[in-house]
Image: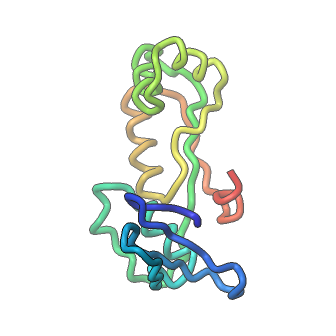
Amino acid sequence: MIASDEGDPYCIDLSRGDTVIYTAAHGMGTWDFSVACGNLEEFLHSVLVPRGFEEWDTSGDEPYEYYKVFLTGEGSDKKKTLLFIKKMFSCDFSQAKAYLEAAPLLVYKGLEPGAAKTGEQLKSIGAEYEVRKVSVAEFLSS
């Protein structure tokens, strides 16, 4: 099992030699698995497109590009940066301060639209940040 949605599992059968993703409804008395996605990359894309980007064109054959966004410094307004961290990690101010002191802090990992949105949020509060394009392997490893 690699994920679940309200108890419905998403699984890969590693014995098959491919990455077809299967799902089944829980609570039915038996597990009746069916194909959810043709491969792992398709599945990841379907779950990583940020809310609000549903109309993003996914019909092309272009490979997906993955990004990480790091908060690297407090920038021009430490208070706004701490509020951003507090909201992002659902923590109190003392924990937000500890996160900021340990920068660089990973604040987003996913597809380009989400990275762009996070970058814009950080830019608007004057925080120091870095957007880094990463390989699929690096994306999956951490």
- 11 vs 51: above or below: below
Residue drawn at (54%, 17%) of the image: 95
Q: Residue furthest front?
A: 29
Quarter of the image where one finds residue 69:
top right
Quarter of the image where one finds residue 73:
top right
Residue drawn at (46%, 60%) of the image: 48
Residue drawn at (50%, 70%) of the image: 10
- 32 vs 52: above or below: below
- Residue 11: x and y in percent read 56, 72
Residue drawn at (43%, 82%) of the image: 60
- 49 vs 90: above or below: below
Quarter of the image where one finds residue 125:
top left
Left or right: 42 in relation to 106:
left
Q: Residue furthest bottom?
A: 16
- Residue 139: x and y in percent read 64, 58
- Residue 33: x and y in percent read 47, 82
The image's colour scheme reads: rainbow
